[in-house]
Image: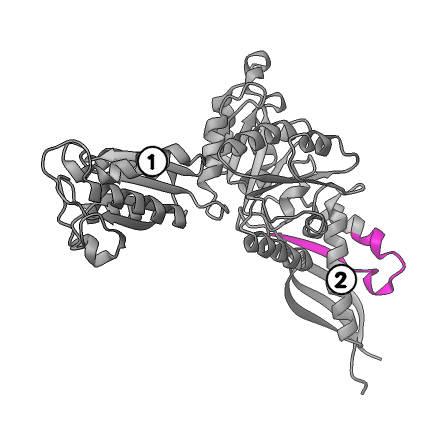
Amino acid sequence: MHEFSVIANLFKILEKIKNERKSLTAFLSVNITVNPYSCIDEENLNFIFKSMAAGRKEYEVAKININRGKDPAGREFILDDVEVEEDGEEG
Amino acid sequence: MAKKVKTIEVGASIFEENDRIAEENRQAYQKHKVYCVNIMGSPGSGKTSVLERTVKELEKHGYASAVIEGDIKGSLDGERLEKLGIPVVQINTGGACHLDANMVRKGLENLSLQKVDILFIENVGNLVCPAEFKLGEDINVIISSVPEGEEKPLKYPLMFKISRICLLNKTDLAVHADFKSDIFKEYLLSTAPSAEFIPISAKTGEGFRLWIDALRESLPLAKERRTVIVGLGDRMKGDDGAGCEVVQRLKGEVENPGIKIINAENAVENYTGVIEKFRPDRVFIVDAVDFGAGPGEAAVLDAEQIKETTSSTHTFSLPLIIEHLRSQTGAEFTVVGIQPETVQFSEGLSPAAEKGVRRAVEIIREKL
């Protein structure tokens, strides 16, 4: 269930990035780091991401990649970086 | 138009908003000197039963509790806790499998923390999701239980890793469930080596003394300052017994579990363990001391005066004892001295020392 919370919070950050970059046309990959023992599962997270992103073309091809962190006592859930596609300069 | 691919470094916490609100919650607890304990565990582990007994035990020690009760639906647990006469705020998550910081913040809006020492947050019964969300708590406590089996720390490692204390509840059922406590402990410590393991039974009370002690040891911010008052002296040596007389009088009028009164006579070194175990925030020492005043005068002595004390029959060094206890407890020390008229071998106090005793009692009363 808390995957919904994760994705809802992730969307807030991604939307902010999108709004700051007018030339952004698509998110290609979303790379996050979680606790090594976090119960978050990559496949499950992507399924919910797709469901919640349905109809939003910037997220159509995006894939979430999970990197397991090293600190077993940490509760960090970090969005490390995103790979995006943007309109390039003409000419 | 040509497309280009870029990598954008972000480095932001996905739970940034939750963590920010959790920090605000933490500041709210600190402002009111409230210690916050996040209680987690699976459904049926006995979280509410443990809380019921815990709240009662803490009350005996002078601590006031409040509870934020998290459930997906209903208020059965909250109603049980309300019967204890403590403030309880029920949060229904409406389907969410955990409490988050914002839910707790909303709960706090309906809770006065003014008279609360310890706020318990009973999280939604779940060994997975609650571990991921900070609420602003001071410590996390996981309650596992005998019927769940020994292997839970291995199956849900994050929950056990983030918890400073692991209570194993329902130990009264161990014999019926063929439960191996040592195996559970081995799994727990292999998962979370620094966790404190305390087997308890909310039904019989087994283990609660350890649990309450562990909780009390974690309470640096409790509203009520824990106080020890120590009387020193030898009653067989005239006015030297003035400090003992002061604590005898205070014993008759102070009834507060947060105040321990000790008549140490001329052997305070025998009580250092008792004092350390009580974990006081402040210690008053009352003693007949020659600090150069008129007979029967009483005053709070400064550090220099304490160093120069020449009194009496004590075989120990008062400054050394204070230094030792200060290093062990971190408490602040106040020495109240009474100027003796005579410390010759005799019973009873001189009229001057009697006056000093009354004044010393007043000084301590004012400071309590």
List the residue tagged with mark 2.
A12
Q: From where the camera sits, is residue B101 visible?
A: yes
Residue B19 at x, y = what percent?
A: 63, 56
Q: Residue at 73% of width from left, 61% of height from top? A: A29
Left or right, B183 with reference to B130 = left
Graded by Cα atoms within 10 Å as few (under 14), some (14 to 19) or many (20 or more), the crowding at tag 2 reads few
Q: Residue at 51% of width from left, 32% of height from top? A: B188
Residue B364 at x, y = what percent?
A: 35, 46
Mark number displayed over residue A54: none
Assess whether residue A75 is covered by the magenta stretch.
no
Graded by Cα atoms within 10 Å as few (under 14), some (14 to 19) or many (20 or more), the crowding at tag 1 reads few
List the residue tagged with mark 1.
B249
Distance in Å between CA atoms under marks 2 and 1: 65 Å
Q: Residue at 31% of width from left, 34% of height from top? A: B248
Mark 1 element type: helix
Report the residue that reaches farthest toward the front.
B351
Quadrant of the rendering where the N terminus of chain B is positioned: bottom right
Report the residue that reaches farthest toward the right.
A55
Residue A10 at x, y = what percent?
A: 73, 58
Q: Is residue B229 above or below residue A11?
A: above
Q: Nearer the viewer, residue B54 or B271?
A: B271
Subunit that carries the residue with mark 2: A
Report the residue that reaches farthest toward the bottom.
A91
Q: Nearer the viewer, residue B140 or B285?
A: B285
Q: Is residue A67 above or below residue B343?
A: below
